Amino acid sequence: MPLHDYSNVLSWVHFGDLHITHRDEQNYQDFLMLITHANTNLAGGVDFAVLPGDNAEDGTEEQFLLVKQAVERLTIPIEIIPGDHDAKAGSLDLYRRYLEPELWRSRSISSYRCLFLNARDNGSLKGFGIGPSQIDWLARELQQADASEQWPALFVHAYPSELGSSADTVQALMRKHRVIMVDMGHTHYNEIANDGRTIYAATRSTGQIEEGPVGFSIINLDDGVVSWKFKPLGSWPFVMITSPADQAFIIDPDQPEQAVRGVTKVRAKTWDALGVVSAMCRIDDEPWQPMRRVGTSATWGCAWDSSGSADGIHRLMVHVKTADGREASDAISVLVSQSGSYEMPIYQPGDDANAIGAYPDKGILGTQLGPNKNGRKW
C-alpha cells in the first residue's frame, strides 16, 4: 500500500503545573531544563506547548514574571490557561498581564479545533466553574467545529466533572459534539481516563512532584486516534505510535484504525535534535518489518495486513534509530476484530471514574500521590 505525505497529525507538548515560587527553587530550574530539551528536540515537531494552569503558586507579580521570563525562552508556540493558584491574589489580573490576556479562546489547526478554557470563571474566590458567557462561547465553538468537520479538543485545568454547577452543562456539550480529548493539569499525577467517547489526560505537576522523575507529556491526534506518553528528562530520540489506537484508547470502534481489521496503516512520529534515520515495526513476535519516512515529515509508516492476525489483543512495537546509533521504542496493545465488533467496557458515570489505571510503558505509575487522591494535601 503506497504511503503519502501524511500531515493530519496534531501534536503538542504539555508541561505540568509549575507552581513557581522563587527563581532558585528546583521546580523553576527543572522548567528551564524542560524548555531547553523541548527547544532542542521538539521544535518543528509539535504544533504548540501547553501550560495547564497553576503557573504561579501564590498568584503574585514576582511569580508570574518568573514564568513569563521562562516561556520567553521557548521557541515553540505556547498556549496557557489559568488554574486556581493563578487566582490566589483574588483575581486573574496579574495572570492576564504577564501570561495570557484572553481567558478563553480557540485555535483551529487542520482537522482539529482546540478550545482553551478558564476553569476559574465561577465568580467565586475558590473552586472551579464556567460562567454563562464562556458556556455560550463554548457551545458556538463546538457547533462551528461540527460544521467544519473538525475534531474538538478541550484544554482545561481540572476534570470537567469538577466544574461545579457548570459541570453538567459542559459534559452535555461534550457528548453532543463528540469532544475526543480533554487535556488537563491539577491532579499532580499522570492519569488517562476513557469514558468510551472521550480521552481525558492529566499530566503530573512540574512544581510539586510526588511520583517519578520530572518531564513532560506529548499528545497526538491522528485522524481521531489519540496517543499520549510521558517523556522524563533524559536521553533522546523519542517515538510514539500515533495509529492504530492503543486498545485502552479506543473511543470509536467503528473506525478500522481503532478496532483494527483488514489492511491498516501503522504510523509513528519521532523527535530528536538530529533526526531519526530508520524505523522498524513488528506485531507480537513476528519478524521486524521496515518502515518508510512519510514524505519529508518526522512520521514513519508501513502497511499491516491484520487479516493474518487472530481476533484479540496484539502487541505492536516500533523501534527507531538515529545516525549516531541512539535508539528508542514504543509499544501499544492493539485490538484486532475482523468483523468490526467490539464489546465496550462498562463505563462509570463521570470522567475520572473511568481511569485506565497504571500503564508504566506510558509513564502512568498508578500511585496517584498528590493533592487530589492519596497523597498529602498541598
Image (spheres, rainbow, N blue to C red):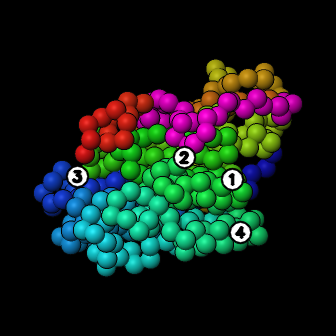
Please give the residue where the numbered disc 3 appears in the rendered image. Answer: 27
- Quadrant placement of the N terminus: top right
Under mark 2, the amino acid is Tyr
Q: Nearer the viewer, mark 2 or mark 3?
A: 2
Under mark 1, the amino acid is Arg
Percent of width and height locating residue 85: 30, 59
Q: Determine the residue positioned at 35% across, 44% down.
A: 188
- In the rendered structure, which disc, 1 or 2, sits on the residue that comes first in sequence? 1
In the image, 54: left or right of 363? left
Is residue 339 among the parts visible in the rendering?
A: yes
Q: Is residue 82 above or below residue 328?
A: below
Return the residue nearer the eye: 169 or 296.
169
User: Which of the labelled discs sits on residue 175, or is there none?
Assistant: 1
Q: Is residue 163 above or below residue 241?
A: below
Q: State how far apart marks 3 and 1 are (Cα).
A: 37 Å
Please give the residue where the numbered disc 2 appears in the rendered image. Answer: 200
User: Which of the labelled discs sits on residue 185, or is there none?
Assistant: none
Q: State how far apart marks 4 and 3 are (Cα).
A: 40 Å
Please give the residue where the numbered disc 4 appears in the rendered image. Answer: 143
Under mark 4, the amino acid is Gln
Percent of width and height locating residue 273: 41, 55
- Quadrant placement of the C terminus: top left
In the image, 339: left or right of 221? right
The magenta stretch spans which residues? 338-364
Q: Determine the residue positioned at 31% across, 76% down.
A: 93
